[in-house]
Amino acid sequence: MTTTAPRLDPRVLGLAHYAARAVLESVLSRHGLAFQQQIVLRPVALADGPVDRERLTEDTVAALKTDKESVQGTIDELITAGLLNAGASEVRITDAGRALYERVTSETSAASARIWGDIPEEDLVTVGRVLTLATERANAELAAVTE
């Protein structure tokens, strides 16, 4: 049976996004993490040292298109859970936070390999280029309507 691949459009993109996010959230829920908590935890886990809390907030707001108060609340949740330590203006991952991040990353990496592993490199490069351009344009559109 041969099927014609659909042309990339907002629906195809959305379906792929929601399917991948559902896989991620199924892993996160097993570990007691919410999506936004993982998004905040990741850059702190990958940093070589403390992360400026304001910069972390700004980067997360920009990535998730959410509000500053929500992100600050998420940082506070991670501190309360013992996954982050807070200084005056910075946060640092705790041993518990690093261990949790590594468990989640291991599980999601395995799922990602099953999802993406046999897609030809040239297709991944093309899709990456198209999605980067679409993201830039969507960000510009959002900036224009919120000014």
Image (cartoon, helix red, strand yellow):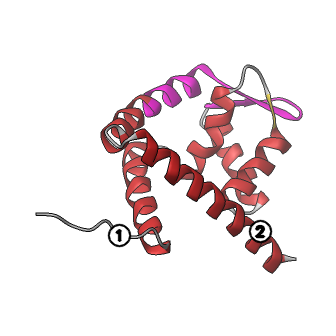
| Nearer to us in this view, 86 or 114 | 114
Residue found at the very far bottom of the displayed protein: 145
**Residue 146: in magenta span:** no
Question: Residue at point 65% right, 59% down?
Answer: 133
Instruction: State the separation of the CA atoms marked 2 and 1.
Output: 26 Å
Give the left or right position of residue 1, taking residue 146 as reference.
Answer: left
Decide which of tag 2 and tag 1 comes sooner along the chain: 1
| Nearer to us in this view, 70 or 48 | 48
Which stretch is magenta? 83-105
Q: In which quarter of the image is the N terminus?
A: bottom left
Q: Say if residue 34 shows up in the picture.
A: no
Question: Residue at point 46% right, 32% down?
Answer: 105
The x and y percentages for residue 96 are 55, 24
Q: Name the residue under label 2.
A: 140
Query: Looking at the image, is 142 positioned above or below residue 132?
Result: below
Foreground label between 2 and 1: 1
Q: What element carries label 2?
A: helix
Q: Is mark 1 on a helix, strand or loop?
A: loop
Question: Residue at point 64% right, 23% down?
Answer: 94
Q: Which of the 4 image quarters holds residue 87? A: top right
Q: Name the residue under label 1.
A: 6
Question: Residue at point 61% right, 36% down?
Answer: 42
Callout 1 amino acid: Pro
Q: Quadrant of the C terminus?
A: bottom right
Q: Residues within 10 Å of mark 2 (few under 14, many from 20)?
A: few
Q: Which of the 4 image quarters holds residue 5? A: bottom left
